[in-house]
Amino acid sequence: MARTILSGRYYCNGCFIGCGRKVKFESVKYGSVEGAGPEYETLAMLGANCLVDSLEAVAKANDLCNRYGLDTISTGAAIAFAMEAYEKGLITQEDTDGVLLRWGDPDAMVTMVAMIGRREGFGRLLGEGVRIASEKLGGASAQFAIHVKGLELPGHDPRAYYSQGLSYTVSNRGGCHLQSFSHIFERSVTLPDLGYPEIQDRHGVEGKGELVATAQNLMCMLDSMKLCKFILFGGVKTTQLMQWLNQVTGWKMNLGEFMRTGERIYNLKRLYNVREGVSRKEDVLPARTLTYPRRTGGLASNLPPLGELLEQFYDCRGWDEMGIPKQEVVRKLGLQREAAFLRDCPRDRLGI
């Protein structure tokens, strides 16, 4: 990208990182493309995940997603799901309105993005996401519908980072890498003020439940303060975030209170989900990531031991074996009013 279509970078106001890309190019196939360029997740999902190696096609698809208001992660995942369904004969060219949804076909990928954005033909079904598309297609499609709680997984394989696999599983909004952002602590970032002075072993198991819970609490605070999580790559530590909040508000919050606030937020979200019927039955990873080892590359044959990781996490959170916050945690966090429904909620309402 830097050698070909990159035309500049952009910064959010006052930011010292400037992660935004600008691209500009003229293409015989795709016409004039100028504006925000594809970032990591977009390159991963609309590119590698669809086996598309045309940078111009990915940039065009990214531009279309921006104009239609589509998430590039879910869009790329949905198209890759459709390509596998096409490969396995679950759908045909007749189903896809004439589009040859073959792996690595840049034109098919770009065409399908536009069809999703306009809700045309097969694009209408894909626009509902892979869970609903799989339910409609039936057959073996559930085996490669890669999502958690209906949200498609991004470009971070849970077989590569065990904490991220656990995080997807217990995420309140489904397969989101930003609910804990924990894989960065298994790759390049430390949290010495929260007890993680060293980079964590990405395939280690011990202590991963606590790492994910701590990271989730921290991310809740970053979200609530409207701060970009990339500042952690810039060396900003939790104590500095707490100091900024105190300086702006006049509060005198200490580090324990700061993190307890994040814990309260995360549990409040979980209680909402529990009210809607979510329990351990939804805290699962796609079967492919639990049972299909990658025999080559950095993933080797690692498969996340989800049962053990979940037990750690529930115990650390103070949730019961079905993933429901216990009353002592509810009281500790002052969420009795929000959790009052638990007293009278039939257990079958929770699916247990």
Image (cartoon, grey):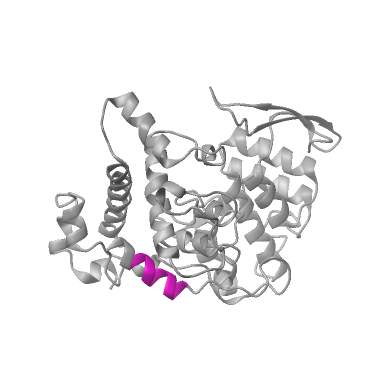
Question: What residue lies at 59% left-to-right and 49% top-to-bottom?
Answer: 73
Image location of residue 67, percent across then percent down: 61, 33
Q: Outermost residue, right direction?
A: 28
* Residue 34 visible to an observer of this rendering: yes
- The rendered magenta stretch, by its main secondary structure, is classed as helix
Q: Nearer the viewer, residue 344 or 186?
A: 186
- Whether the magenta-drawn stretch holds residue 309 is answered as yes
Question: What residue lies at 17% left-to-right and 61% top-to-bottom?
Answer: 328
Question: What residue lies at 42% left-to-right and 41% top-to-bottom?
Answer: 238
Image location of residue 210, percent across then percent down: 39, 61
Q: Nearer the viewer, residue 287 or 63?
A: 287
Relative height, residue 105 to residue 39 (above, below)? below
Of the 4 image quadrants, the one containing the N terminus is: top right
Of the 4 image quadrants, the one containing the C terminus is: bottom left
On screen, residue 327 versus residue 324, left or right, reads left
- Name the quadrant containing residue 316: bottom left
Q: Magenta span covers which residues?
A: 306-314
- Whether the magenta-drawn stretch holds residue 49 is answered as no
- Name the quadrant containing residue 234: top right
On screen, residue 55 versus residue 65, left or right, reads right
Question: What residue lies at 57% left-to-right and 69% top-to-bottom?
Answer: 289
